[in-house]
Image (cartoon, helix red, strand yellow):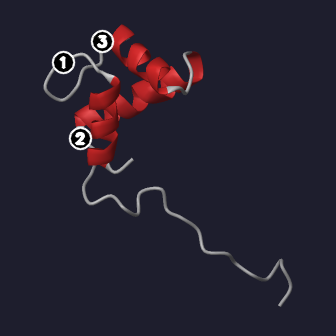
Amino acid sequence: MSTAEHTWPSLDVHQSRNHEPTPYERKLARTLEEVFTQDGHELADVVAGLNARQVRTPDGQPWTEETFTAEMHRLGA
């Protein structure tokens, strides 16, 4: 079989999702894309970017490095 005939398995970006994203999850994802583009990828940059945009934790608090890491773990990211 030639390479052109072979199809490689692909990863569906939503295959591990067990529910549709909530409004909170969609807002967080959109804001993270903005932060990564404009502010940086380091954890401190991400936390500062979220707080500067007033996107809060699920319980309404400002982000810390610890709460962001815990939330990403909870969301499976």
Q: Quadrant of residue 30?
A: top left
Q: Which residue is mark 2?
A: 22
Residue 13 image position (x, y, % from top left): 48, 56
Q: Which residue is mark 1?
A: 61
Q: In the picture provided, is 23 more to the left or to the right than 13?
A: left
Looking at the rendered structure, which numbered label has been put on residue 2? none
- Of the numbered discs 3 and 1, the one sitting upstream in the chain is 3
- Front in this rendered view, residue 58 or 4: 58
Q: Quadrant of residue 52?
A: top left
Cα gap from disc 2 to disc 1, whole angstroms = 18 Å
Q: Which residue is mark 3?
A: 54
Is residue 73 positioned above or below 27 on the image?
A: below
Is residue 9 positioned above or below 30 on the image?
A: below
- Front in this rendered view, residue 22 or 54: 54
Residue at the spot 79% in from the left edge and 83% down from the top edge: 5
Secondary element at tag 2: loop
Residue 47 image position (x, y, % from top left): 39, 20
- Of the numbered discs 2 and 1, the one sitting upstream in the chain is 2
Q: Quadrant of residue 2?
A: bottom right
Q: Is residue 21 visible?
A: yes
Cα gap from disc 2 to disc 3, whole angstroms = 18 Å
Q: Nearer the viewer, mark 2 or mark 3?
A: 3
Residue at the spot 70% in from the left edge and 78% down from the top edge: 7
Crowd around label 2: few <14 · some 14–19 · many ≥20 (10 Å):
few
Residue 31 image position (x, y, % from top left): 41, 24
**Residue type at mark 3?**
Gln
**Residue type at mark 1?**
Gln
